[in-house]
Amino acid sequence: PFAIYLRMIVFISFSETAQQQFLIASKLVPALLSVSTVLLFVITFYGIIGVFLFNDSVEGSEFFPSLLEAMWTLWTSMTSVIYPDLMMSAYNENRLTAIYFVSFMILTFFFFLNVILALVYTAYENTLGATHKQVEDVKADCMEQAFNMLDKENTGSIPRTAMMSLFLILNEDYDEIRTIPENDADLMFALLDQDGSDSIDLKEFQNFGTVLLLEFKDYSKTTWFENKFPTFSSTSTYHRFSSIIKSEAFETAIDVAIIANCIVVLIQSYPELLGHEVAANNGMIQGGWEVMEAIFTLVYVLEMIAKIVVLGWDRYSSSLRHVFDGLITVMSLSTIVIVYYPNEFNNPVMIQVVLVLRIFRIVRLFMVMESFQIIGRTFVAILPSAGRTIVLLFCIMYVFSAIGMQFFGGLITRDPENRVSYLLEGTDFAGALYWANNFNDLISGINVIFNLLVINNWNEMESGILAVSETKQSRWFFFTFYIFGVILVNNLVIALSIDTFNNELEDDGKNKNYSFLGKRLVFDANKLSKGNANLSGNYEAHLYTEHKTVREEKKILVDLFDDRGYTV
């Protein structure tokens, strides 16, 4: 029976991400103890009052027969799954009893749970800050030791020749470090030499580790089309076409087309939206509406092609808005071909997919709004961190599912030959038809744990387990998961979302001063060189690392180029 736990132990042993997340979670636990103690006192206090207040009443016999039952009732109420149901019998008899229940919910649901969120967020910020400081301190110490080794004459600086020799040694003797071309070495030195003294002091050398991670690529403002067809690209016709495609008026025209397209889709889909049956499409373009839809799709395809020609693939693909438009356009065109072109895969039902994809284009209009752009960037930026948190959540769900299998496996059944099946009669569990929610196997158990994570109706699941286990000790399973799964992990995800959103708001204004292609920063080497004739032209700088998010990479690049006027 312990093999299932051994698998998780092996997984955590080999997963650095899981170890890091458990370390962060463990540092959040102490922050919860103080407020949890006060919360327990409040629940106990209200439980005692409830036992005396509702003595010899329907409310008392059902929800407050003893102190422990009263505390469990109040705890369940705090999670909002049985509120206001538990108060209605007493409230129907006496409206003043609302004071008891409402005051309890204000203290616990509205106050303490939000205080717990604030504590988790603060502890999360402090933990990240302490971890970052520890890493930076170790990095600074290592850089100082390396600097002292290179500064053999104790002049307080390392000359250019010594740094160039260092790059050569790294290329020849250290395979784990990528080969650094001579031009890249010049760019790296220029980035380090902030004061233009042609030597590197200790403060400047602190950035050496970060600069080593940089990759540089020539940046050309001319596109593949312009390089392939230089004669046509130099004509006034192409220049006028290019200026039109890059203009705000063109974007406005496309936005108007999208609005018109959405109106057409709504009119075309109006009977279905009202729930009326519509005749199935036979795979042929029928009626004026579908002709208009085909025209709109053609417009979007031409728009995508024109932008790729004028902007080039790098600049086109670096824009989240362009990538979204292009993806929807390609998917719509592919689905239309499948629907309308006669072939063995012809499936008229897919026309519904086409309609849904067309509606998605309205999202583009929101991308014009700055607040929506920040939300979109927050969603993209949070994905790597959310992925790491999901690893922690998976581990917790796996362990609790395994525990559920060990104690409750096989108890949920509708087999009439099994006496346990009759114990579920009349329970909320049976009334809700939750039969498939059980711990009879690992996957089913994980599904149950996810349902508990969502919180809604978890008491109905608890009623079934309570009935078949025939002991109220089973409640500890649900209580413990609520602590670790809901209070800890859910609040950790919320804290992560708040932190990422705040960082995006902060970075939004700062990054506007720099030219980015996706996560690559474009800079002018002429400004960076400070007289070095070997450096000229425009370059893209990119961090060669797999352990940084897009926001973190951009922040590092901005810090390297900050207030130095090197960007184009």
Image (cartoon, rainbow, N blue to C red):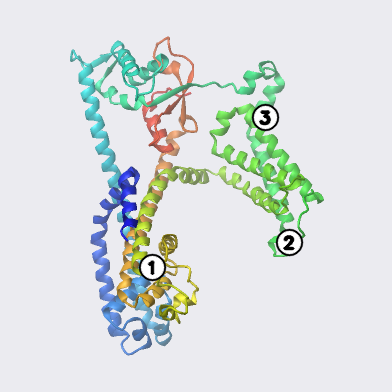
Q: How crowded is mark 3: few (under 14 residues within 10 Å), some or many (20 or more)?
A: some
Left or right of 550: which side holds 306?
right
Q: Which of marks 3 and 2 is nearer the N terminus?
A: 3
Residue 459 coordinates in the image, percent (x, y): 40, 72
* Residue 145 seen: yes
Q: What residue would you read off at disc 2?
A: 271
Q: Residues within 10 Å of mark 1 (few under 14, many from 20)?
A: some
Disc 1 to disc 3: CB gap under 8 Å: no
Residue at (44, 67) in percent of width and height: 456
Of the two numbered discs 2 and 1 in the rendering, the one whose residue sits closer to the viewer:
1
Disc 1 marks a residue whose amino acid type is Gly
Extreme-bottom residue of the structure: 56
Q: Helix, strand or loop at disc 2?
A: helix
With respect to residue 248, does 284 lie above or below? below
Disc 2 marks a residue whose amino acid type is Pro
Disc 2 to disc 1: CB gap under 8 Å: no
Extreme-right residue of the structure: 287
Task: Give me the C-alpha separation between circle 2 and circle 1.
Answer: 49 Å
Extreme-left residue of the structure: 154
Q: What residue would you read off at disc 1?
A: 409
Left or right of 297: which side holds 537?
left
Residue 543 coordinates in the image, percent (x, y): 41, 29
Disc 3 to disc 2: CB gap under 8 Å: no
Q: Residue 244 carries which label?
A: 3
> How many numbered marks, from 0 up?
3
- Residue in front for this viewpoint, 134 or 428: 428
Task: Give me the C-alpha separation between circle 3 and circle 2.
Answer: 39 Å
- Residue in front for this viewpoint, 366 or 182: 182
Residue at (41, 74) in percent of width and height: 464
Residue 47 coordinates in the image, percent (x, y): 28, 77
Of the two numbered discs 3 and 2 in the rendering, the one whose residue sits closer to the viewer:
2
Residue at (59, 21) in percent of width and height: 222
